Image (cartoon, rainbow, N blue to C red):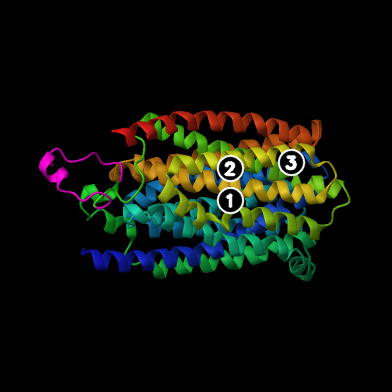
């Protein structure tokens, strides 16, 4: 494939992935906004409400590796469409279970709908398959940004969803899942029609050295050739990444997982915290919309910064924002404004860590091994969110939002500690 054709196919691929991801975002917005409230309503137990985020992320975790295997064998297109099909079935189960009042069955439906999150995670990696090294973080971040529309609109569909729910004879809040069902069907259709040719299958036809910024310099290059280069030109277009290796990859995965755990833990209990302090469904919707906008709206900015400044500095910036979020959440009390500020910073910090972390992991991994390591990352990331979501309900029931923020601070310390060796290795790489 010549460079011009590669750029053309990559532009089409990013456009298709972005369009499908916009639609997939409705499932995220619907599940995050009303899942906990519907579970609390059906079960009559606030502690069980934390299962909404837990099972949503659990579904994504279970699907991560199988979808990666499908991608490795049959391409990204087959994997993305298969994941969307499971999410469609999940939306149907959620609607039917709400109609009969079964909270365990509703939890299963939310878990199946959580596969849509695994699809979105896979889509962001699909955007890197044909990307040039200098554009890899940017293209990845554009697909992440695309979740913004559906995910931000989703929580604000509570009102229309209630009307749909009443019309169908199910709990009003569950009506939002009807929108998620339609969106998932459209997302599957867009990927099925649009991802031709398949980016992963095409990328396997490219020369190996084009697949990774972290590929070592060719020994055949002589000192004379190196000396002939003009200063400021012919340099590696992307900031140098830490030397590749399983250890560095696991550190990057740990950092991403901790950011996910912090985000899910605080976000999962925000609706109940607000409702316990004279909040309304509308305030919950606005708060989660601000949070989700923070997660996705500025992802292209973080992608650009990661390309220009380096992946690890942007990860470090994310930890700073997450620290500010945790501190504000600890002090928020009944203040809706402080909770909204905390949740916005929570989304921004999560975005910086996960965008830069995903780009870093891609560059640390040889092309042939990327689907496997990307699947591991997505599974561990989602599993961390599932565990955090489940335990957040227990922590909230035992203490309060401040206690939950304190526990999130411990996760933050672990994630930041994992980033320190990555920073040291990156500085070592630049000095060589």
Q: Look at the picture and state if 73 lies above or below 323.
A: below
- Any magenta on residue 21? no
User: Image check: 1 left or right of 431?
Assistant: left
Q: Are marks 3 and 1 in contact (CB under 8 Å)?
A: no
Query: Which residue sits at x=80%, y=57%?
Result: 283
- SS at badge 2: helix
SS assignment for the magenta stretch, majority: loop
Between tags 3 and 1, which lies in front?
Answer: 3
Magenta residues (range): 213-233
Question: Which residue, given by chain and number where applicable, does mark 3 sit on?
Answer: 328
Q: Residue furthest front?
A: 231
- SS at badge 1: loop
Query: Which residue sits at x=83%, y=41%?
Result: 333
Task: Give the distance between the C-alpha atoms of the residues marked 3 and 2, in whole angstroms.
Answer: 28 Å
- Tally the numbered discs: 3
User: Image check: 277 left or right of 344?
Assistant: right
- Identify the image quadrant of residue 223: top left
Q: Are marks 2 and 1 in contact (CB under 8 Å)?
A: yes
Q: Earlier in the sequence, mark 3 or mark 1?
A: 1
Question: Which residue, given by chain and number where applicable, does mark 1 sit on?
Answer: 114
Q: Earlier in the sequence, mark 2 or mark 1?
A: 2
Q: Could you tell me residue 36's position as x and y percent? A: 73, 49
Q: Earlier in the sequence, mark 3 or mark 2?
A: 2
Which class describes the residues within 10 Å of circle 3: few (<14), some (14-19), or many (20+)?
A: many
Name the one closer to the observer, 266 or 3.
Answer: 3
- Any magenta on residue 229? yes
The label on residue 58 is 2
> Can residue 166 be seen from the camera position used here?
yes
Q: Could you tell me residue 113's position as x and y percent? A: 59, 54
Name the one closer to the observer, 7 or 26.
Answer: 7
Between tags 3 and 2, which lies in front?
Answer: 3
Q: Could you tell me residue 105's position as x and y percent? A: 68, 49
């Amino acid at each position: 494939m010549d460079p011009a054709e590669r750029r053309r196919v990559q532009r089409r691929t990013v456009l298709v992935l972005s369009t499908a991801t916009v639609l997939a975002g409705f499932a995220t917005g619907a599940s995050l906004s009303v899942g906990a409230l519907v579970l609390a309503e059906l079960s009559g137990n606030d502690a069980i409400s934390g299962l909404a985020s837990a099972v949503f992320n659990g579904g994504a975790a279970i699907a991560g590796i199988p979808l990666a295997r499908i991608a490795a064998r049959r391409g990204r297109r087959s994997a993305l469409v298969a994941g969307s099909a499971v999410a469609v079935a999940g939306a149907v189960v959620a609607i039917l279970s709400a109609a009969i009042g079964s909270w365990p069955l509703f939890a299963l439906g939310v878990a199946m709908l959580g596969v849509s999150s695994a699809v979105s995670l896979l889509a962001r990696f699909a955007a890197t398959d044909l990307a040039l090294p200098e554009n890899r973080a940017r293209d990845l971040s554009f697909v992440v940004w695309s979740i913004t529309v559906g995910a931000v609109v989703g929580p604000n569909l509570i009102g229309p969803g209630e009307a749909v729910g009443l019309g169908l004879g199910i709990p009003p809040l569950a009506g939002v899942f009807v929108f998620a069902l339609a969106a998932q069907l459209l997302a599957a259709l867009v990927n099925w029609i649009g991802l031709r040719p398949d980016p992963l299958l095409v990328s396997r036809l490219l020369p190996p050295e084009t697949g990774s910024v972290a590929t070592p310099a060719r020994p055949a290059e002589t000192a004379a050739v190196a000396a002939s280069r003009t200063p400021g030109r012919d340099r590696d277009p992307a900031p140098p990444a830490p030397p590749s290796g399983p250890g560095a990859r696991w550190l990057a995965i740990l950092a991403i997982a901790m950011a996910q755990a912090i985000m899910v833990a605080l976000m999962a209990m925000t609706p109940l915290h607000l409702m316990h302090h004279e909040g309304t469904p509308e305030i919950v919707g606005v708060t989660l919309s601000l949070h989700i906008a923070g997660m996705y709206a500025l992802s292209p900015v973080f992608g650009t910064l990661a390309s220009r400044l380096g992946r690890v500095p942007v990860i470090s910036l994310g930890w700073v924002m997450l620290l500010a979020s945790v501190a504000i959440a600890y002090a928020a009390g009944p203040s809706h404004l402080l909770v909204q500020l905390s949740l916005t910073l929570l989304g921004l910090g999560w975005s910086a860590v996960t965008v830069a972390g995903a780009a870093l992991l891609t560059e640390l991994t040889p092309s042939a091994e990327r689907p496997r390591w990307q699947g591991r990352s997505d599974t561990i990331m989602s599993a961390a969110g599932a565990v955090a979501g489940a335990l957040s309900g227990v922590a909230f029931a035992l203490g309060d939002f401040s206690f939950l923020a304190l526990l999130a601070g411990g996760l933050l310390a672990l994630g930041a500690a994992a980033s320190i060796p990555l920073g040291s290795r990156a500085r070592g790489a630049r000095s060589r």
